[in-house]
Amino acid sequence: MDRVTLSESTFEKLVKHLVEIEEGKKKLLDQYFSTPSKERYEFKDAIEEYIKRIDQLLINANKSQTSDNEVPFVTIECEVELQDLSLHEVFKYRITNPLHERLREGDISCLSPVGKSLLLKKVNDVIMVNAPGGIFRYKILSIQLQNHSEIGSSASESVASVLPGDSSRIS
């Protein structure tokens, strides 16, 4: 992996995120994939690859004093701006950990078809999402790691948002 420059705050958020994901992966597996299945093994492999890529990013990162929240690829807690390549509409969504209760409009679970398709992708990547409503194509326009203070204040105030073609629930 190439050297990447991250702001000090983004670096610290990613370190905390990495610890949270490593500590919570068993709970996530047990809660959403309780029995041995193809999906459980696929998700386990995907989460291990996710942890590995975040770890590599942190090892290869140079820290700077800038205040931006840019990251080189989509992680959980990122806000991703997407363009629907069929409708030419632009959407902003935050990829969430389904174990978190603080949800807001525009949140998409990392377990949803769109969420799974976005993880670890980069700006300008085109993703294809196979969802209950069909196959959809989106281009990634921007990626920003969100501050925890920018995350919705309570689950009761949140509204589930669904991308076209992603009829799965947020969590």
Image (tube, rainbow, N blue to C red):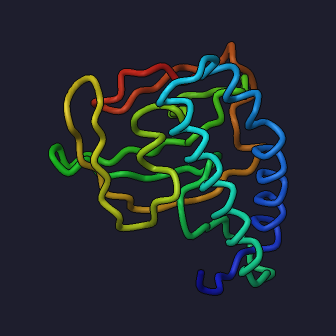
Decide if residue 79 is on the left or right side of residue 67. Answer: left
Residue 84: x and y in percent read 25, 47
In the picture, the quarter occupied by the C terminus is top right
Residue 21: x and y in percent read 75, 44
Residue 162: x and y in percent read 40, 27
Q: Which residue reaches farthest left?
A: 86
Decide if residue 61 is on the left or right side of residue 114. Answer: right
Decide if residue 101 is on the left or right side of residue 44. Answer: right
- Above or below, 78 against 52 in this view is above
Residue drawn where x is 54% and y is 57% of the image:
74
Of residues 64 and 117, the one nearer the viewer is 117
In the picture, the quarter occupied by the N terminus is bottom right
Q: Quadrant of residue 3?
A: bottom right
Residue drawn where x is 61% and y is 67% of the image:
71
Of residues 151 and 134, the one nearer the viewer is 134
- Above or below, 71 against 163 in this view is below
Of residues 79 and 113, the one nearer the viewer is 113
Residue 30: x and y in percent read 70, 22
Residue drawn where x is 67% and y is 61% of the image:
52
